[in-house]
Image (cartoon, rainbow, N blue to C red):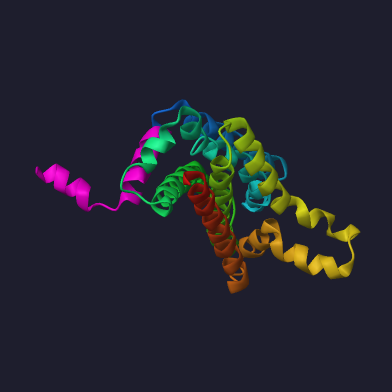
Amino acid sequence: MTNCAKSEKIKNPAFIVMRRELKSYFTSPIAYIVTGLFLILNGIIFYSTFFLLDRADLRQLFGNLPLLLSFFVPALTMRIFAEEKRSGSIETLFTLPVTETQVVTGKYLASFIATIVMIAPTLFYIIPAEVFGSPDYGPITGGFLGAVLLAACYTSIGVFASSVTKNQIVAFFTGFIICIVLTMIDSFLIFLPSGIVTFLSFISANSHFTSIARGIIDTRDIIYFVSMTCLFFVITVKVQQQAKK
């Protein structure tokens, strides 16, 4: 057995799946198109506030981030399972010595990394804010931490949506609907009875993200994002286990 073969054998299958998916992401135009559109829209939002409103901070960027990620994360993840189900290669994958949990882990990590790569260039917006103003780094740090947690949550939702269908468009709209509901649900709280408001406020991703983006690191907000990420991850594993039977 060669050294290369030995190396492949001792690697965790989840990381082999992740590496394969990352290669697929960045050798196809989808990731570049989605990332490019995301950065163009973010740039318009940021610089319109920066110059037209003469406000050197990142509040407008973070204020619109949950809405943008609700659209762009499902666009990144829509193919992760759906394409393999459509082509039939998912059956071949599950004949290998790999568990459903390892497959979902590998695909989730690849999707999460692709999402972070999409968001990462927005860090450069700190430079003009620093040059032309005196930004408060508490909210900036909180905003980017919240962005990572929000990306983890929405990526898990997007991977789940892709796991339940063979159609990428259906996967996109399924993920988008779940994400946009979690983003927009607190906009309708004013019309609801007070007893329901507390529950819906808790499940609102936007309210938890907004709290962190103010620079207030509350363990309840972190627990929310970790819990939602784990919930959809576990559901995706269950879906794959049922599909394999």
On screen, residue 121 versus residue 38, left or right, reads left
* Count of picture labels: 0
Q: Nearer the viewer, residue 67 or 198?
A: 198
Residue at 66%, 37% (x, y): give it: 173
Magenta span includes 24? yes
Instruction: Tell me if residue 54 can be seen.
Output: no
Residue stretch rendered in magenta on the structure: 1-25
Q: Position of residue 130 (x, y in %)?
A: 53, 52
Q: Give residue 245's position: percent from left, percent from top.
A: 48, 47
For residue 74, what is the image quadrant?
A: top right
Residue sitting at x 54%, y 43%: 163
Image quadrant for the N terminus?
A: top left
Question: What is the magenta segment's predominant secondary structure?
Answer: helix
Q: Nearer the viewer, residue 51 or 206?
A: 206
Q: Please, is residue 219 above or below residue 155 in the view?
A: below
Residue 232 in the image: state x and y as whole percent. 57, 55
